[in-house]
């Protein structure tokens, strides 16, 4: 059974669990230091035609700002397939840094967009096509931590990564998620260690800030929030593997 804690509680005491099952209670800075033992230095954000702009660009800006304040993250935007330009759901045209197949990131972020409307271009089509869920599953098998922002979490579900694990997604796709083997929880962000999900659109900012705090420190997360004039809200649900 997992537990929740306030998303805005930067620097407060939190619970965690080490890989040997030992339950710990420590401040977030120390928790981040523990997680940094294995290291998480490369971040890839998967882009495809019809992805929601904020799902991808919100976390991108959080991570890039974190790099300004001490995190050594190398953040790239990666196309699902070989493509010079990817067009997002609201018309933003993005020039990816290269295809996803060319990298094995420590952290892989999958945006949502187009699931609820079953759009021809979007995450629904990518899930049906199958190559993105396959790439996500393969990355996770190689040790990558995988994040599903908004309905990007449905790709994680198709990849089999949410089976028996706590998860959340955009409100419009909750019933679709309930129909899977995931355990749906009422939280803004769900952290189950190597698999994280969050609610709709702006929740991606909260998840990204949470990851900055988890992997680098509360100080870095606070600096990012001050720079962006952003205040995280809602709860983080920590699963047993977090």
Image (cartoon, grey):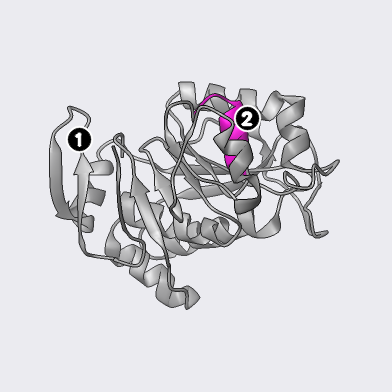
Q: Quadrant of residue 185?
A: top left
Q: Residue at the spot x=42%, y=46% of the render?
A: 190
Q: Which residues are magenta?
A: 152-161
Asked if the residue at tag 1 contacts the one at tag 2, i.e. Cβ–Cβ closer than 8 Å, the answer is no
- For the point 14% across and 53% down, which residue is it? 26
* Picture quarter with the C terminus: top left
Label 2 vs label 1, nearer the camera: 1
**Residue under label 1:** 18
Give 122 or 84, whichever is nearer the viewer: 122
Residue 165, x across and y down, in percent:
42, 32
Query: What residue is shown at x 42% (from left), y 68% (from top)?
Result: 224
Q: In this view, which residue lies farthest toward the right?
A: 120
Tell me if mark 1 has few (under 14), some (14-19) or many (20+) residues whose alpha carbon lies within 10 angstroms of its own: some
Q: Nearer the viewer, residue 159 or 212?
A: 159
Which numbered marker is on residue 141?
Answer: none
Residue 14 covered by magenta stretch: no
Image location (x, y in percent) of residue 2:
30, 41
Q: Is residue 159 magenta?
A: yes
Say left or right for 238 vs 104: left
Marking on residue 102:
2
Which secondary structure class fits the magenta region best? helix
Q: In the visual, does 28 lie left or right of 82?
A: left
Q: Is residue 51 above or below residue 209?
A: above
């Amino acid at each position: 059974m997992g537990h929740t804690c306030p998303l805005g509680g930067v620097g407060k005491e939190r619970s965690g669990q080490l890989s040997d099952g030992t339950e710990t209670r420590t401040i977030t800075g120390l928790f981040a230091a523990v997680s940094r033992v294995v290291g998480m230095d490369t971040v890839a954000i998967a882009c495809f035609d019809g992805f929601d702009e904020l799902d991808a660009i919100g976390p991108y800006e959080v991570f890039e700002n974190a790099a300004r304040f001490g995190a050594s993250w190398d953040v790239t935007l990666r196309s699902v397939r070989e493509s010079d330009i990817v067009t997002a759901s609201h018309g933003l045209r993005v020039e990816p840094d290269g295809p996803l197949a060319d990298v094995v990131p420590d952290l892989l972020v999958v945006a949502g967009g187009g699931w609820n409307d079953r759009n021809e271009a979007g995450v629904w089509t990518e899930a049906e096509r199958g190559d993105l869920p396959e790439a996500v599953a393969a990355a996770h098998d190689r040790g990558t931590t995988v994040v599903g922002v908004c309905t990007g979490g449905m790709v994680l579900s198709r990849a089999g990564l949410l089976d028996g694990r706590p998860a959340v997604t955009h409100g419009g796709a909750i019933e679709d998620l309930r129909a899977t083997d995931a355990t749906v929880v009422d939280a803004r962000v769900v952290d189950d260690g190597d698999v994280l999900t969050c609610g709709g659109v702006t929740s991606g900012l909260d998840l990204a800030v949470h990851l900055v705090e988890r992997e680098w420190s509360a100080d870095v997360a606070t600096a990012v929030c001050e720079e962006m004039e952003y205040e995280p809200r809602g709860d983080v649900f920590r699963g047993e593997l977090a």
